[in-house]
Image (spheres, helix red, strand yellow):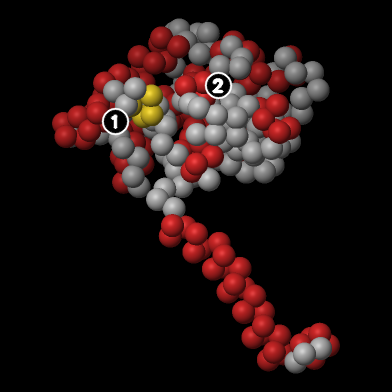
Amino acid sequence: MKHETIETNAGWLIVLTMIVISIGGLVEIIPLYFINNTVETVKVDGKETIRPYTALELRGRDIYMREGCYLCHSQMIRPFRDEDMRYGHYSLAAESQYDHPFQWGSKRTGPDLARVGGKYSNAWHFQHLMNPRSVVPESIMPNYPWLKEPLDYADIKDRMRALKAVGVPYSETSEEYQANVERFGKDVADQLNILKARENLIAQAGSGNYDGNPEDISEADALIAYLQVLGTMVDFSKFEEGYFAEFR
């Protein structure tokens, strides 16, 4: 059949287009039925190291989205050599399993933040939020002085319950708490207890003192706590080279 015949006959064009789309769809879908899991298993000493966010980190993530940080920063390192050299190990699916919504993206007006945790001090982050050009002269990021305002965390339990409803393993019952102890360890399980959310948030903000002001808990405290945990839940030195490729 000549190509011209296909282009000038709407019926043939539709039929053949649908065939091509069907083949492409099958090539993508069928392999998924032969893969046990597309989310990597990340365990050290029998405990999962990738956990849901603490109450303070969760509020920080909410502020991150409220301020539109995702419009200029991605959180997804691609499996390419140049990205590995600049940002570190490529992002794992497991690292986003508790994100609703995930923050992957491809827009990089600013650098990728998937592994920014621990890269800079709390003081650096706070100064960067208040006046980016004071630490990065070429930055075009706007100032965020209002992040010094007190953090509203009155509804933190409801926020955690909403995420629990879509599968994030926060706990409210003793059975759920014990399951988290087995899964993540006691220290993490305590942080995931919805009933102690306010106390945990206050304690983490006090011990972290992320904004340098111990007198109150600011929005900057929460946002910096969130930034400082990004990319820190997987210690790649504890896994053999090529281990995570088995899940791809």
Percent position of residue 4, x then y: 83, 88
Mark 2 in CB contact with mark 1 (< 8 angstroms): no
Instruction: Specify which label sits upstream in the sequence, 2 or 1.
Output: 2
Location of residue 82 by image quarter:
top right
Label 2 belongs to which residue? 117
Amino acid type of the residue tagged 2 in the rendering: Gly
Alpha-carbon distance for marks 2 and 1? 23 Å
Residue found at x 54% / y 39%: 245
Quarter of the picture containing the N terminus is: bottom right
Q: Exactly how many numbered labels are in the figure?
A: 2
State whether residue 198 appears in this view.
Answer: no
Identify whether 22 is placed above or below 55.
below
Label 1 belongs to which residue? 183
Amino acid type of the residue tagged 1 in the rendering: Arg
Q: Secondary structure at mark 2?
A: loop
The one of 82 and 223 positioned closer to us in this rendering: 82
